[in-house]
Image (tube, rainbow, N blue to C red):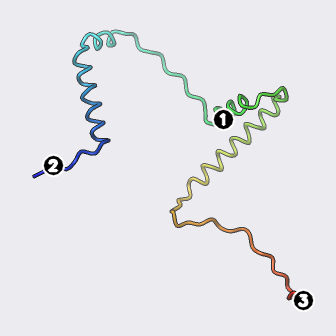
Amino acid sequence: MDAAPLPRREFGRLLTAGIGGVALGMSGETHLATAQEPPVAEKPKPPSMAALIHAQIVADCPSEHWDDATLESLMGDIRGDLARGRTLKTVPLTNADEPGPIFAAYRTPEPRPQ
């Protein structure tokens, strides 16, 4: 009886695990050296998404008109946009969902003269 074909992602995982195992088997000294190193200090907390977006906007649009009030206003807009995005993300949608139309054609109450 033939075995089912191995999916390529599973093959990649097995190949990576095998190569990692061979590399660990060849470098026994590396394991001892890393065990004796002093513990590394805690990594700094990564910046928030709002701070990253803010920095990118300022980098993309350099200007002498950026002052503290403008930058604070920009950061508030970014935080508001991200909050709206999180709120919208909570509503589950399917492919069959359509947007709610806001537009409605204006109909005059009187018929058009002919």
Q: Is residue 15 left or right of residue 2?
A: right
Above or below, 3 against 40 in this view is below
Question: Which residue is the site of mark 2?
Answer: 3
* Badge 2: residue crowd in 10 Å (few <14, some 14–19, many ≥20): few
Which amino acid type is shown beneath numbered disc 1?
Ile
Q: Residue at x 66, y 35 (%)?
A: 53
Task: Assign a secondary structure to mark 1.
Answer: helix
Tell me which numbered mark, 1 or 3, is placed earlier along the sequence.
1
Above or below, 47 against 98 in this view is above
21 or 6: which is nearer to us? 6
Direction right: furthest residue = 113
Horizontal and vertical percent position of residue 86: 60, 49
Which picture quadrant has residue 90?
bottom right
96 or 82: which is nearer to us? 96
Horizontal and vertical percent position of residue 60: 71, 31
Question: Which residue is the site of mark 1?
Answer: 53
Q: Which mark is residue 113?
A: 3
Direction front: furthest residue = 114
**Circles 1, 3 touching at the beta carbon (< 8 Å):** no
Which picture quadrant has residue 40?
top left
Is label 1 or label 3 in front?
A: 3
**Circles 1, 2 touching at the beta carbon (< 8 Å):** no
Task: Assign a secondary structure to mark 2.
Answer: loop
Is label 1 or label 2 in front?
A: 2
Q: Which mark is residue 87?
A: none
